[in-house]
Amino acid sequence: MQEGEGGGVQPGLLGDVVISAETAARDADEAQTTFESELYFLLLHGILHLLGYDHERGTQAEAKRMEAREQEVFSLIREEFLSA
């Protein structure tokens, strides 16, 4: 949201997270988890990307850092929202 034409218009805006419900449902089935859990995970994953975490283009250490942060935050989400 900060790059290209119109970039910087909303300096506090990081970007959008778009989740395919069909893909989330398929991934949930494959992982043998709930659809809701998969949605929370994908949202968290997208937010971490917006915050600068990168497991694809970064180093292996950066990928591990992102994964560790994902696990840390997702465990809190699981406790708070998914255990009810």
Image (spheres, rainbow, N blue to C red):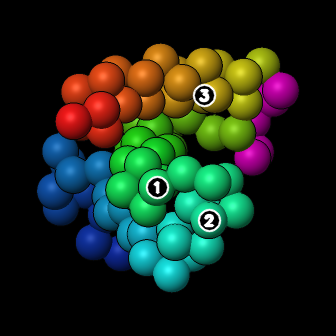
The secondary structure type at the circle numbered 2 is: helix
Q: Amino acid at mark 1?
A: Thr
Q: Is residue 40 above or below residue 24?
A: above
User: Which image quadrant is residue 4 in?
Assistant: bottom left
Left or right relative to 10: residue 68: right
Left or right relative to 81: residue 31: right
Q: Amino acid at mark 2?
A: Asp
Quadrant where the N terminus sits is bottom left
Spot occupied by residue 27 in the image (x, y as percentages of width and height): 62, 64
**Residue at (43, 69) in percent of width and height:** 19
The secondary structure type at the circle numbered 3 is: helix
Quick one: label 3 or label 1, which is nearer the N terminus? 1
Q: Amino acid at mark 3?
A: Met
Marks 2 and 1, how far apart at CA: 8 Å
Residue, disc 2: 29
Residue, disc 1: 34
Please state the extent of the stretch shown in magenta in the rendering. Answer: 56-60
* Total numbered badges shown on the rendered structure: 3
| Label placed on residue 66 | 3
Left or right relative to 17: residue 42: right
Spot occupied by residue 11 in the image (x, y as percentages of width and height): 20, 48
Spot occupied by residue 59 in the image (x, y as percentages of width and height): 81, 29
Marks 3 and 1, how far apart at CA: 23 Å
